[in-house]
Image (cartoon, rainbow, N blue to C red):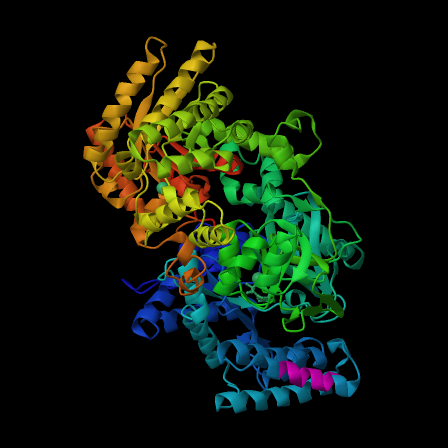
Amino acid sequence: MEAQESGEHKYVYDFAEGNKDLKDLLGGKGANLAEMTNLGLPVPPGFTITTEACKAYLTTGREPDGLAAQIEAHLESLEREMGRRLGDPDDPLLVSVRSGAKFSMPGMMETVLNVGLNDHSVVGLSAQSGGNDRFAWDSYRRLIQMFGKTVCEVPGEEFEHALDEIKSAKGTHNDLDLNADDLRGLVDAYKKIFAKHTGREFPQEPREQLDLAIRAVFDSWNAERAILYRRQERIPADLGTAVNVVAMVFGNLGPDSGTGVAFTRDPGSGAQGIYGDYLANAQGEDVVAGIRNTVPLQELEQLDKTSYDQLLGIMARLEGHYKDLCDIEFTIERGKLWMLQTRVGKRTAAAAFVIAGQLVDEGLIDLDEALHRVNGAQLAQLMFPRFQLDHEFEAVAKGIGASPGAASGKVVFTSARAVELAAEGEAVILVRRETNPDDLNGMIAAKGILTSRGGKTSHAAVVARGMGKTCVSGADELDVNVPAKRFTVGGHVVNEGDVVSIDGTTGKVYLGEVPVMPSEVVQYFEGELDPENTDDALVRSVHRIMTHADAARRLRVRTNADTGTDAARARRFGAEGIGLCRTEHMFLGDRRELVERLILAHGDREREDALAALLPLQRADFIEIFREMDGLPVTVRLIDPPLHEFLPPLEQLAVNVAVAQERGEDVAKEEALLAAVRRMHEENPMLGLRGVRLGLVIPGLFAMQVRAIAEAAVAVVRDGGKACPEIMVPLVGAVQELETVRAEAERIIAEVVGDSGVEVLIGTMIEVPRAALTAGQIAEAAEFFSFGTNDLTQMGWGFSRDDVEGAFFWRYLELGIFGISPFESIDTDGVGRLIRIAAEEGRAARPGLKLGVCGEHGGDPDSVHFFHEVGLDYVSCSPFRVPVARLEAGRAAITTTGSDSR
Ligand code: ADP
Ligand code: MG
Ligand code: MG
């Protein structure tokens, strides 16, 4: 390439100068075009303007010094190579101008093809093509359309209307039926549309077309949708986009030309083979736009065997080179094959696991790399039950898979009706145009939620994900008529009470009930499928990768389980202990009465009697759990919620009293309960009398629980079993609270344990910000910390989950204030900082302090990486999330540097 003036910044790279590792500078598309060029593959020549040029332009508002000259020099050299000049009236060179950031980003400008055409060069293009007038005018009208739409923001529908008009005037639906004269007429119509919307004529000067297109790509970095997307995906705002200028090749020159897309393996299942679509006599964007019907790529073998064989050879070569599934775009111009793009292809969750396993078998990657190539979100998807789909079921609509799962049920259109039918035991699907906070009860009652508007951050989507409920949002083919209690879709009318099925992963909507089949991955985890002895490629691959993750990870994985049944399932899923055993459920059901006695007790005697009655019940619960966990650590949290949660609601009691009085019955107990509920009422129960505060206020309550735990452990050990209890005190904010509880607990434990050999650890949750900030002091009295990230998030942000998720989270997500709900994925900057401080200061005060986390964040992929990084010993999550946490803990351990893959 020509020499750069000394000290001048290099803003333009010929394809021969780049490579695939220069994505930061050349963007994904540019870096891969360079890589293919250097592999000697047939890529049309061209050059890439760097992201740095874009950044400079965006900061100063003008093209940086030297850029124009460098573009000029590269254009000249491209012209020399092609033997044609840009827009030459007699023999024009045409180029495409293609955006390409490091990460592909919806909302940014796409591509302008055929730059360099004008009223004169269109004639030259026709001559070049051997007098193919139709082709030349078709190319010109495409330029005006794309340039108008993407560079000058002319509404695209206007061009489409003009095209439709001309087609209907000819009585056809196929643009191939339009002849050169029709297309010449269309060019005139397009030019008028262009002038009307931009106040100027369509630019005839080729270099001006090029410069305007380049500038439009730069500007599109700051388009509103692009900014929003970056905020949500946490893509840095200052990366900028590159611009690729590529010599045009033509797939629309006749039946011996065409264009297509291909995958090196099936991106749906991962199966090996040829997957792609081909469209003869067409230009690039036609395939994607679905304007005409494509044929399966295999048919190219009949049409053009030479190109087909060459393409297959190139695909094999690319896959070997990238060591991964590749997604490519190509064009054939009169029997000559051109490669226009390649990238590592997107794939389904199942394909990700299957392909990673295949590539290990083929010796292309090792197991570390295979583990890196899959993720916990994909594994979680594979654990949901799926619809059993055969030819009988065809989707009637497709929206956005907003919250995964498969749900069938009767259609309802209002929250109230959803609640009514659900109370009768019916499965219902709540269908709305969009949901709002008033729909909350209906959403809770429904099996699934279906909306015709809104994306992944709509109210419906956000709330459904928070509840773990199946949701399809934005199915815009649905015409929802709430007052008439029906919706229509593709000619079908669906009334209230009719059954539909929705798939929250694919976004598809089906009429009728589609049978559901269990996930084979769950069957494998449950031990029902032998991974060594199955022909299920997915299960084999999951097994292999999980085994590797377990060997690689440093973090232990425990589960949140309150019963022996949950504990048993979690162990099958690989849990290595219980990180959170809640004791409050042990106060429910027929034990409620004892709790009422405890609350209403007059004097020590009555209270002690109530506690004494609870003790053997609690002990039996713990024995069951310790047996099930067989010596694995079990963290038991002392009672946490406010006691009034165990009493009936105020309104109900008031009615009971009134009714009983009316009948002349004895109302003493009802009145006492009512008085207690009134007395115990709290404005902010989340911040009220709960957790350790209960233990300090109600004599004997914690003592009873500690005794039950210790006695259960001793009973199991005396029986020849093993038990490893850890007593966890909730909601501690000051070391004095913990010291007080600890003193009493130690006394009881010493008394119960005797010489049984049972050891009981005492620790605390860190869930109040003050506890995190005084962790050094608290560690003096705690043998372990468990971060209660749900409360830490609530109190760190100062909002209560129940109140805010439905009320304003959708708006925060829309505005990009959150990229993701902080209840879903740990807020590393704020709440995470509290964890970091507590971990460091706690360990400084007590080396060897055990650190864990309980709460749903323990099963969230990104959060697991964070917990690994801050040095926690374990995470604890719900049984179903245990495999996800194991996989991500393994990935965190092998990921030494941040990955670029998004
Ligand atoms: P996207 O990122 O949306 O795929 P591309 O820049 O890849 O945008 O271009 C859109 C379409 O135009 C693709 O089908 C591509 O193959 C085609 N295309 C781009 N550049 C050229 C070119 N120089 N010659 C022929 N077709 C092209
Ligand atoms: Mg493309
Ligand atoms: Mg809590």
Between 388 and 670, the one lying in front of the other is 670
Over which residues does the magenta segment extend? 159-167
Is residue 490 a member of the stretch shown in magenta?
no
- Residue 280 at x, y percent in the picture: 74, 66
Please state the quadrant of the image where ligand 1 appears.
bottom right
Q: Residue at x 43, y 12 (%)?
A: 717
Judge left or right: residue 250 versus residue 547. right
Please say if 615 is above or below 129: above
- Residue 846 at x, y percent in the picture: 22, 27
Q: In which quarter of the image is residue 834?
A: top left
Between 704 and 892, the one lying in front of the other is 704
Question: Looking at the rendering, in which quadrant would you find the N terminus?
Answer: bottom left
Q: Which residue is drawn at 29% across and 20% down?
A: 748
Q: Can residue 895 be seen in this view?
A: no
Please say if 573 is above or below 643: above
Q: Can residue 606 be seen in this view?
A: yes
Between 564 and 829, the one lying in front of the other is 564
Q: In which quarter of the image is residue 220?
A: bottom left
Q: Which residue is drawn at 63% across and 67% down?
A: 284
Please say if 741 is above or below 687: above
Judge left or right: residue 60 versus residue 133. left
Is residue 166 a member of the stretch shown in magenta?
yes
- Residue 195 at x, y percent in the picture: 53, 90
- Residue 138 at x, y percent in the picture: 67, 79
Judge left or right: residue 758 versus residue 536. left
Judge left or right: residue 508 versus residue 707. right
Q: Quadrant of residue 612?
A: top left
Q: Main secondary structure of the magenta part?
A: helix
